[in-house]
Amino acid sequence: MSIIKGFEMTTSQALDLGEKQPLDLASIAMAALEAGRMLLSTGAKCTVVRSGMIMVATGLGADRADVRVGFASISVTVGDGPRTVTRMLGVGHHGVNMKLSHRLRSICARAARGEMTCEEVHAELAAAEKASVRYPAFVVALAAGIACAAFGRLLGVDWPAFVPILVAGTIGQWVRMRMVHFHVNGFVIAGTVAFLSSLLAAFMSIYAGSGLIQVAMTAAVLMMVPGIPAMNSQMDIIEGYPTLGSARALSVGMILIFLTIGVGLARLCLTGPDMSMEPLRNGIVHQMVFGAIAAAGFGVLFNFNHGNLLLSGVVGAIALGVRTLGMEEGWNLATASFVAALTVAIVVEMVGFLPTNKYCQAGKALALAGCIPMIPGSAAAHWLIGLFGLMSHTPVDAVPVLTAAIQSGLLVIFTIGGIGSALAIVSSLARRPEFPE
C-alpha cells in the first residue's frame, strides 16, 4: 500500500493515475466509417472520402488511420500506440448530393480540430442528412426535363421536338425517382426509363411534326447519363486509386449499355418515321444559352444550393461558348471540349480564391456541372447501337456500320478523356482545400 497526502491506495491505482484512459478505438472506427460512407454516397471522389475518414479518426484521438475505399464497402484500421482496431462498412446507393457533401466536409473539419466526441459526430452526421433535403420531387423531375430539352437543342434538334423532349424527360425522371424509392436495381432503372422516355419523345415528336426523331429520342434520356461518376472514375485513376476508379468506370459502362438497350427497344417500336435526318447547326449564343440551362438543370439533380445553381449555369454557358468557338475554328470535338473544360476549371478556381467567395467547396463540382453538357451522350448511344446493329446486318452492310460505331466510340473516349484530363490538370496545380479550414 502507498500513502499520498493522507489517502490510502493500492500500487496499481497509483500507477493508473499517471496513465491516460485507453481510447475506444471501435467507436472511433465506426464514426470514421459512417462519415466515409455518407461522403461516398454523395458522389465524392476517393481522395475526399479518404481524407474525411482520416480527419475524423485522428481528430477523435487515434494516432493513425489506414483507409480502404471500395465501390461496395469501405474499411478503416485505427491505432493508438500498439493497439489497433479494424472495421468495415457496406456502401449503398451512389448518388450526387452537394448540399449534404458540404455539410459532411464541415463536420469532418470540426472533428479534425478535436471539437467533437464520437457520439457528437454520429449525431451531427444524422442531423446533416435530415437537414440536406432535396428539392421537391416535381421540381427535380421538371428540371431534368428542361435539361434534356436543352440538351436536345445542343444536339441540334428542331423546335417542334423541344416540348416533347421536355415532357418525356420529366416523366422519365419521375419514374426513375419512384423506382429508386422502391430500391429497384440501378441498371434496370436505366433501361426502363430509357425505353419509356425515348418512346414518349418519339411519338410526341412525330405528332408535333419534328423531322429529327432519333435526336429527340436520344436527348430525352440524357438525364440518365452518369456524368459525375464518369468524371470521378477518371479522377480516381489519375490520383492513384485505380480500384475504385475502375469499378466506377465499369458501372458507367453498364449504365450506358442498359440505356442503349432501352433506346434500341424503343426504336424497334417505330417502323414508319424517317430517323436519318441531320441535326440542325446553331450559333454560339444559342449554344451558350442552352448550355447554361442544361448545367443548371443538372445542378438541381445534384442538389446544389441556390447560389451554386446560378454559378453552374454560368460555367455551363462558358463551356459551350468556348467549345463552339473552337469547333468553328476547325477543331475536332475532343480538342474543343478539352480547351473548354480547361477554361471552365481555371475560371472556377479563380472564383474559389476570391476572399468574398462563399462556394469554396463547390468549386470542382461546379466545374463538373458546367462540363456535363459537353459529354457526347448521343455519340455514346450511336456507338453502342451500332455495335448491337452488327448482329442484324448482312456482311455487305457490316463494314460501314462497324466503321460508324468505331468512330462514335473513339469520339466518346477521347472527348470524355479530354474533359477529365483538363479538370485533373487544373485541380492538381491549384490545390484548394477540399474541406473548410
Image: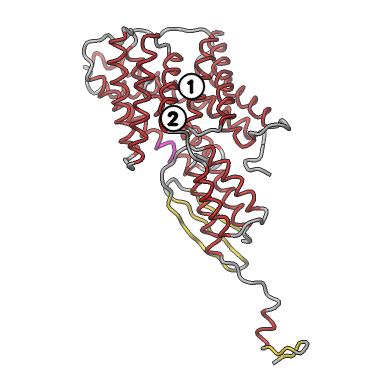
Q: Which residue is mark 1?
A: 294
Tell me which label, 1 or 2, sits earlier in the chain: 2
Q: Residue at x 50, y 27 (%)?
A: 417
Report if residue 53 lies within the magenta region.
Answer: no
Compared with 300, 202 (above or below) is above
Query: Which image quarter: residue 428?
Result: top right
Query: Which image quarter: residue 312?
Result: top right
Q: Residue at x 29, y 25 (%)?
A: 196
Numbered disc 1: secondary structure: helix
Q: Amino acid at mark 1?
A: Ala
Query: Which image quarter: residue 368?
Result: top right
Numbered disc 2: secondary structure: helix
Q: Position of residue 157 (x, y in %)?
A: 40, 11
Compared with 26, 149 (above or below) is above
Q: Quadrant of the C terminus?
A: top right
Q: In the current view of this chain or complex, which residue is farthest to the bottom?
A: 1
Q: Amino acid at mark 2?
A: Val
Tell which tag, 1 or 2, sits nearer the viewer. 2
Q: Position of residue 190 (x, y in %)?
A: 34, 32
Residue interval drawn in magenta: 247-251
Q: Residue at x 38, y 15 (%)?
A: 163
- Residue 185 relative to residue 347: left or right: left
- Residue 286 relative to residue 201: left or right: right
Report if residue 250 lies within the magenta region.
Answer: yes
Q: Position of residue 287 (x, y in %)?
A: 51, 13
Compared with 215, 105 (above or below) is below
Q: Quadrant of the N terminus?
A: bottom right
- Dominant SS of magenta comes to helix
Gap in Å between the C-alphas at discs 1 and 2? 13 Å
Q: Which residue is mark 2?
A: 140
Compared with 248, 293 (above or below) is above
Q: Residues within 10 Å of mark 1 (few under 14, many from 20)?
A: many
